[in-house]
Amino acid sequence: METTPRRIVIGDVHGHYDGLMTLLEAIAPGEDDEVYFLG
């Protein structure tokens, strides 16, 4: 089954490394996904 790559946008994570790692584990970005960090 073919999947469409996702564009994942994550807001301000300053000082929240553990939360960011938890989020990234939960969404499990794939090789073709694009992850953008703002702020």
Image (cartoon, rainbow, N blue to C red):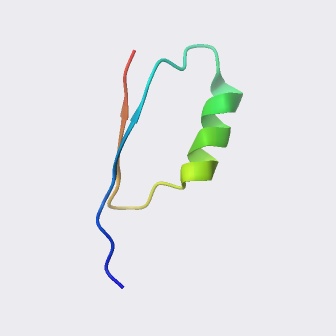
Task: List x then y, in percent, for residue 39.
Answer: 40, 14
Q: Position of residue 37 (x, y in %)?
A: 39, 28
Q: Nearer the viewer, residue 3 or 20?
A: 3
Could you say where residue 27 lies in the image, as x and y percent from the top left?
54, 51
Residue at figure coordinates x 33%, y 54% from the top left: 6
Q: Residue 26 at x, y = what percent?
A: 62, 50
Give the residue drawn at x 67%, y 30%: 19
Most extreme residue toward the right, as rendered? 18
Residue 8: image quadrant is top left
In the image, residue 30 above or below residue 38: below
Residue sitting at 44 percent across and 23 percent down? 11
| Left or right: residue 35 compared with residue 28 | left
Asked which quadrant contains residue 3, the reply is: bottom left
- Left-right relation of 12 to 24: left
Which quadrant holds the N terminus?
bottom left
Numbered circles on residues, count: 0
Q: Is residue 12 left or right of residue 6?
A: right
Please, is residue 13 above or below residue 32 in the view?
above
